[in-house]
Amino acid sequence: MVKRIKRRPYGRKRGGFGRILGWIIRAFFLFIILSILWVLLYRFVPPPITFTQLGDRLSGRHVSRDWMPLARIDDDMKRAAIAAEDSKFCAHWGFDQDAIAEAMRRNAQGDGVMRGGSTISQQTAKNAFLWQGGGYFRKGLEAWFTLLIENLWSKDRIMEVYLNIAETGIGTYGVNAGAQRYFNKDASNLSRTEAARIAAVLPLPKERDAITPSGFTRRYGNSISARIAVVQRDRLDSCLYGDGETAAPVEKDEPVRREGPRAKTVETPEAPTRPATAVEPGAEYEEQPPTEPTPEPVPPAEPAPEAAEGNGF
């Protein structure tokens, strides 16, 4: 009796490479599904912990954070973040191509100072879902999560998460915890100067201090304080309010005059007889000897200056 051997149909036999490719495809689609669900969850739930916060805890450092809804955060704190980090926040779809191109151009000059072109959306994606540090792999993941939050979250939700998880000091996360650390108050009633100082700390939170800033940090904070009025005047924060309008003006401390070689004068409601200055993007990364600027009248319809370049490229 002859025993018949069953043969595998043609094309069904897969070698080691085929099996590996199959697992890669499955893992890719699993990552897509899980990342979408992860982003959708954070649309309604505050992130319980981030990789940066986890790193602090594992190193034995105390982590201070205190979530505050965006509606309660002082309007000038929101404007300070836009003025310092991303002036086109309400207009772009997650990426500022002009800022990225400018950062790449300056970095190619090789002056030893690395500049970034990250938007608030990119920084939120990195802080909420990823880890610190560079590398093309992490930047690729950052781009993916940026697209997700821009399409699955609202702009005000992006700002809310950003202001609550951004590092504002060693072991301190969020502007509310930062306000309590530096000024012994919460973030619902900050002066314009206090909001600007917290925003000035954001790019290098482990190296800068908002209580008694000196040198570059003080000058950078003064420039942000001046640009807050520009953000309010040009309604660059309009996407943070449900009716599409900015909040009503609030009288606060007078903006401080910025000294530097790249300044322009801008008339502000708080000081109509005293020009406040606004600094062009990237100036906060350049240490230059202060000189007296030459006043140049700015038409009222001129768009606001570029914002700061973020936490690194």
Image: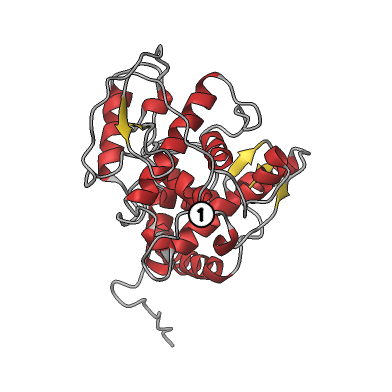
Three-letter residue code for mark 1: Asp
The foreground one among 77 and 20 is: 77
User: Is 119 positioned to the left or the right of 197 in the image?
Assistant: left
**Image x and y of residue 184, in percent:** 73, 43
Q: Quadrant of the N terminus?
A: bottom left
User: Is 232 positioned to the left or the right of 133 in the image?
Assistant: left
Taking 38 as reference, is 164 above or below it? above
Reading the image, the residue beneath label 1 is: 75
**Image x and y of residue 135, in percent:** 44, 37
Please tell me which residue is depicted at 58% across the width and 56% down the height of the picture.
73
Q: Is residue 102 visible?
A: yes
Taking 197 as reference, is 5 above or below it? below
Q: Residues within 10 Å of mark 1 (few under 14, many from 20)?
A: many
Please tell me which residue is depicted at 69% across the width and 54% down the height of the picture.
66
Please tell me which residue is depicted at 31% across the width and 23% down the height of the picture.
262
Q: Quadrant of the C terminus?
A: top left
Judged from this view, the residue extending furthest toward the front is 273
Q: Is residue 19 visible?
A: no
Q: Quadrant of residue 167?
A: top right
Q: Quadrant of residue 90?
A: bottom left
The foreground one among 197 and 301 is: 301
**Image x and y of residue 267, in percent:** 33, 38
**Image x and y of residue 30, in percent:** 47, 67
Classify mark 1: helix, strand or loop: helix
The foreground one among 100 and 180 is: 180
The foreground one among 153 and 233 is: 233
Taking 287 as reference, is 12 above or below it? below
* Picture colour scheme: secondary structure
